[in-house]
Every structure is written in structure tokens, then in C-alpha cells.
Amino acid sequence: MSVYIGLDIGGTKFMAAAANAKREILRRIKASSPQDLDQGLHLLKEMVTEVAANERIAGIGAAIGGPLNLRTGVVSPLHQPEWRNVPLKKIIEAEFECPFHVDVDTNVAALGEYHSYPKRPQSLLYITISTGMGGGLVIDGSIFRGMKGEHPEIGHQSIHFRCSHPEKVICECGAPDCLEALVSGNGIRRIYGRPPERLDAHQWDEVAYNLGQGLRNLSAIYLPEVICLGGGVALGGGEKLLSNAQAVMQEYLKLVPAPKIHLSRLGYDTALFGAVYIAIHGIE
């Protein structure tokens, strides 16, 4: 039997899964991400070999942080400082002699989430809020791409925000007022001096307000049918964060219908399931 391999290559953990052509997971493993590039590539090859379990590999799909070149498969994930201009597609295809597809992790996660629905929505915006913030938009089954195929950076929109310490709102991109700097794990630690799980009620209210203003912008511009939130901050904040942010969005959103909003159906596995999908179907 042939298997398809999905890889979620993150800054803190690697995940690998083998699946059949129906996208049913057969085997899966997880490991901590090495900082060293050579160690990381060696670990990826070991994980692929282990989950393949001596079966023929028909295709491999991977989710990784951007930026990357979609055509060449050269990757430079920001949260993995030693991974710069890595010809990942060339390396993996030479090692396993099968097609290899790689895309930005939020795009891959969006595909995973989209295809988890028994009845597919016309458009779905997946947003991850974790160390940073990003998203992917799927329209009629295809990833929306910007000019020259570039990946839209939804976390780097400017919003009208509320913050007890506005002088600490500093985005890693260099801009002074990005949404990511207000609601991501790194942003929360910088502003409040503590991790998200230790925020008090007032601090969570600020995060929810700012997230709601960002959701308002995205809803007004993209008009998605569904917005799905994943990542450690969103899943940790849970339904209370979601409902408070949604209330802010609905209060300020005018002229266009509000989308359905919910937490990820796949939890922390969105990118892994999406990677299995692109291993089988490729990238549009």
C-alpha cells in the first residue's frame, strides 16, 4: 500500500503523520524542534521514514513558517533563525524520490480546516494566534494569494486599539500598531509581562477588544462565510475570548453580514491535516 506523509515543521515542535488516500491517519509522531539546521533536516528524514513504516511514499506535504518560495520550495521560516534559504523541496524529493509540496503553515492549516467540514463553506478564513499571528483564506477550495503569489499578512493590519501600556506595543515587523503586537503570545508577554494563561480579566478584555477590531476589518474586507480561530492563545482563551471578540466585531461591523466564528475543529492538528491534504492533492 502507498502512504502520504504530512509534516508540520514548527519552531518548537515537528509533527509527522502517514495517511491513506482517504486522508485517514495511520501513524503519527511528534518531536521537539532542533535549533540547528542539519539536526532539523536529519530529524525530519527520520520522522518520515518512521511513519512510512516501509510502505511506498506516494507524496509528502509540509507546513512551515514563512516566508518561502512556493514554486521552488526554498524556505526561510522566521521563527527558525538557522533555516535561511533552505532548498527543502530539492532535499526531500532527492531523499524520498516522490513529489513534495510545501506552503506557509497558515495556508496549509486553512486547507486542513476547510476540508474538515462535511459541507464545505464557500469561503473560510483561518486565523492562528500563537507566538505570532497569521492566517489563510480558502475560497471555493483554493488558497487566496496576493500579488505575485505573496502571502497576505493579516496580523500586520493597523487597528484602533485599547491597551494599558501603549508604549509597549511594538511589532517585530517594525510597525508601531499591528494587531499581532497586541494579541499574539509574544505581544502579550511584551505588554503585560506575563504569558497569556496568567492574564487577569481586565487584560483579557483588552486582548478580546483588539482581536474583535481586527476581526471587524477582516470581515469587512474579505467577507468570509466562516472565520476559524486556532493557535495556543486562541485555544487557551477559549469560548470567552471568542465570544467577547465576536461581540466587539458585531458592534462595529456595519454594511456587511457578520461571518460565523468558531474555534478550530482540529485543534493543534490543523496544519498536520492540511499537510496530508497537499501531499495527496498538491497545491493549487
Image (tube, rainbow, N blue to C red):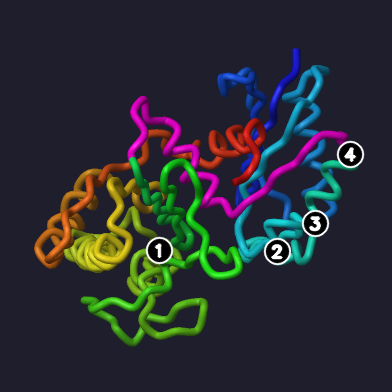
Of residues 278 and 240, which is closer to you in this image? 278
Q: Which residues are magenta?
A: 95-121
Q: Which label was assigned to residue 76?
A: 2
Query: Considering only vertical position in the picture, is 257 above or below 52?
Result: below
Q: Residue furthest top?
A: 1
Tell me the CA gap for discs 4 and 3: 16 Å
Q: In what element is the residue under mark 1?
A: loop
- Mark 4 vs mark 2: which is more N-terminal? 2
Q: In what element is the residue under mark 2?
A: loop
Q: Which residue is mark 4?
A: 95
Q: Which label was assigned to residue 184?
A: 1
Tell me the CA gap for discs 1 and 2: 21 Å
Percent x, y of residue 5: 69, 30
Q: Is residue 42 left or right of residue 210?
A: right
Please, what is the three-letter code of the amino acid marked with disc 4?
Glu
Query: Considering only vertical position in the picture, is 160 above or below 218?
Result: below
Tell me the CA gap for discs 1 and 4: 36 Å
Nearer the camera: disc 4 or disc 3 = 4
Q: In what element is the residue under mark 4?
A: helix
Q: Is residue 203 left or right of residue 273?
A: left
- Mark 1 vs mark 2: which is more N-terminal? 2
Percent x, y of residue 248: 15, 62
Q: Which label was assigned to residue 37?
A: 3
Percent x, y of residue 107: 52, 51
